[in-house]
Image (spheres, rainbow, N blue to C red):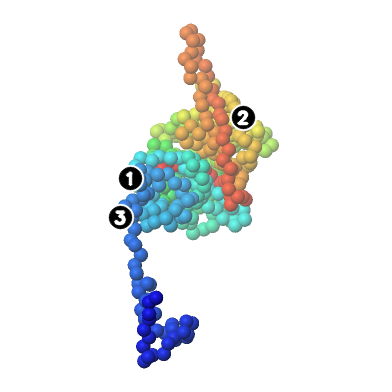
Amino acid sequence: MQRVRISSHSPVQKLGDSQMSSSPKFKLATATRRLTPPEPPSSMESAQLIPGLPDDVALNCLLRLPVGTHPSCSSVCRSWRQLLGNKERFFSQRKRLGFSSPWLFVLAFDRCTGKIRWQVLDLTLLSWHTIADMPCRDRLSPHGIRCIAVPDEAALLVCGGTVAGMDCPLDTVVRFDLQRDRWTTMSRMLTPRSFFAGGLIGGLVYAAGGSSTNFAELNSAEVLDPGRGEWRPVASMSSSMIAFDSAVLDGKLLMTEGWVWPFVFSPRGQSYDPRADVWEPMAPGLREGWTGASVVVGGHLFVICEHESLRMKFYDRESDSWETVDGSPVPKKIAKPFSVNAGDHKICVVGRDLHAAVGHVRRTDLQAPEEGKERKKASFSVRWQIVDSPETLRGVTPSSALVLYG
């Protein structure tokens, strides 16, 4: 047994004595343990985006993460936060590495808050996220706005519209760049307008007709050169008209006022040719059969028929008639009001609560005609895929929809 010698010059301390905690020896030992630095992580773990993977492979993986998961993934480490915590850096890296995925941008109106906002659906991963609010001074109505995609620049323009609760058309134009993830204000239109026709032709943005103050219809038209940032007037229409829908087909801007109950009078329609700077009457069959929201896919004009059980049809130029697309109608879960757009031979229909249906369009008349026989008329079929929205989007309705790639 080991003997312990105790000095007679100091009293013996009992375990639990209040003076025990004030002993210098105990303080020193505690301080020494607290100051001991933790073991530093290995250089391999601190340098790599994903331990065990080369950085180029790891970066390729991170650039495929759903945007909605970025806030939580940014807390993994500093490198992840630098990439995922900044959407501009994220999309710039995607562009540099050649990523080009479709994103469905939906201008949506929340009935609970009375506000509009942009929701974005990743058409590859089928996940939703939001972008920053538009830099608008006035509170916009969800109706009467014209949204135009600029695909080559992965950008969209939001033009005109009205102030919520007021008969006050707007001339404002704002632009969102997908790669930069930011809004910018552009030159104002020459004429404030809402419910007007608009489209992109040859890199130029056109706006025509619409409604002015006191619900007066307009016949003026104008064009924007995004490079110069200036609007200039073009030929006016033969008659003033509010646009129910518009589309760009064969390099021309088509505009229809749509059918109005009780469907006694045929709707008016006009076509603008920017090469000749002239307006022409729309072909009768095209005008009378345009009974819903339109979209152009592969150089063909398709319409979701609002008065025909949401079936889809397409316009045949040669016969100036409309033909039904083979396949089922738009799924019943897609309730009105809805917005339509397309990308990569897929038609996207977004309805109430932002439930979406993606229609995979296929041409079915591509077989070579038999010798001595005429080629068959064009024909198409569609197969629908439903994309359910999350509970957080209940009570939200679409106002416009656009597809961008980035």
**What residue is drawn where x is 46% and y is 47%?**
66
Q: Position of residue 289 (x, y in %)?
A: 59, 30
Q: Position of residue 198 (x, y in %)?
A: 48, 41
Q: Quadrant of the C terminus?
A: top left
Dot placed on the residue nearer the N-terminal end, 1 or 2: 1
User: Are discs 3 and 1 less than 8 Å apart at CB?
Assistant: no
Question: Which class describes the residues within 10 Å of circle 3: few (<14), some (14-19), or many (20+)?
Answer: few
Mark number, residue 54: 1
Q: What distance separates the C-alpha of mark 2 from that of mark 3?
A: 58 Å
In this view, 81 is above or below 286: below
Q: Quadrant of the N terminus?
A: bottom left
| Front position in the image: 295 or 162 | 295
In this view, 89 is above or below 298: below
Q: Which residue is mark 2?
A: 328
| Left or right, 120 with reference to 351 | left
Q: Amino acid at mark 2?
A: Ser
| Left or right, 35 with reference to 392 | left
Q: Quadrant of residue 305?
A: top right
Q: Which residue is mark 3?
A: 43
**What residue is drawn where x is 37% and y is 49%?**
50
- Kindly tell me whether residue 12 is visible in this rendering: yes
Q: Amino acid at mark 1?
A: Pro
Question: Which class describes the residues within 10 Å of circle 1: few (<14), some (14-19), or many (20+)?
Answer: few
In this view, 13 is above or below 136: below
